[in-house]
Amino acid sequence: MDKLNVLVSLITDANDYQLEQAASAQSAAFQLGANVQIIYSGNDAVQQTQQILDFMQNPAKRPDAILAEPVGTGMAQIARAAVAAGIAWAIINAEVDYVSTLRQLRQDSLVPVFSMLSDHDAIGKIQGQQIAAILGDTGRILYIEGPSGNVAKLRTKGMLATKPRSVDVKTVKGDWTQKSGHYAIKSWLSLSTSRQLHIGMIACQNDAMAIGARRAFEESEDMQERDAWLRLPVTGCDGVPRAGQEWVRQGLLAATVVSPPLMGDAMRLLVTSLQTSSQPPERTLVAPSSFPPIQELQSSLGTAKQKP
């Protein structure tokens, strides 16, 4: 097999998990003797599609395979165009319904098509368990949700399924970046009602938004209010070792949910498929874990009582 040329399309370079995705792709490519080109879409679905098309349509840059983590939808049209052109396609961290159909599209040669995703419903369920461990049976959380799409919806669904029934959820929106978490909290704090809600903790759908939220609280000019906000437990998701997990060790976050990077494993599946002339599994789901473990979280934090 000639040296494989793989295009990896990621959401943003302003997110530690996305950077970990890139690092895992580069490490796997080195181990497998493949060439990898990594591009970031700047959280722009249109730009992401155009970037991929540019590579597909340029003979000098045309990849043998595309591993894409989409900003918005699952990019069904571009996936079909890639497979029709003989380019292997893997969709990462998105629920799509077209993989089975595309696997049958090329009958003349093997074109691997598959999906690999973190179990985002399970991520949400773990976060709901963390909320119960930290906050107890009652209270109110401020929940920073990612942008509209499958990942955010599944994480929210899972969280709502396992958080205590009497815990109320107030939701604000972010876009997976520290900047968006900071902006979400600054905007929320500007509301006259924010001080009246008696928030007991801050739960965020990723660690970047969580640390951005803390930064917004740190900027409060009222020192008494600032200290009260900063006493609240803050949780995130993704659990990158040098970011989310380290922030937990430093006490900046109370907990995170570890979701392993997938790009390296996706590349290994791709290469194995080509070496064995067989399709990889149609859908691979990767399980998350709590950091720290739920039992440890319960014993170390108990029920949070401090409220601003």
Image: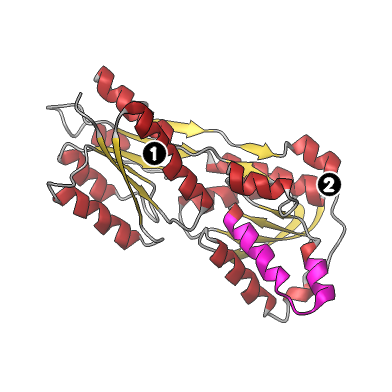
The amino acid type of the residue labelled 2 equals: Leu
Q: Is residue 213 magenta?
A: yes
Q: Is residue 150 magenta?
A: no
Please report the residue visible at 71 percent of the width from the left and 69 percent of the height from the top: 217
- The numbered dot on residue 301 is 2
The boundaries of the magenta stretch are: 208-229
Residue 250 is situated, as x and y percent measured from the top left of the image, at 73, 50
The answer to which image quadrant residue 105 occupies is top left
Q: Is residue 186 left or right of residue 22?
A: right
Please report the residue visible at 73 percent of the width from the left and 78 percent of the height from the top: 193
Q: Secondary structure at mark 2?
A: helix
Residue 223 seen in the figure: yes
Q: Is residue 270 left or right of residue 152?
A: left
The amino acid type of the residue labelled 1 equals: Gln
Please report the residue visible at 68 percent of the width from the left and 56 percent of the height from the top: 203
Residue 282 seen in the figure: no
The secondary structure that most of the magenta stretch takes on is: helix
Asked whether 136 or 70 is in front, the reply is 70
Please report the residue visible at 68 percent of the width from the left and 50 percent of the height from the top: 247
Q: Earlier in the sequence, mark 2 or mark 1?
A: 1
- The numbered dot on residue 26 is 1
Image quarter of the C terminus: bottom right
Q: Secondary structure at mark 1?
A: helix
93 w.r.t. 210: above or below: above
Residue 51 is situated, as x and y percent measured from the top left of the image, at 26, 56
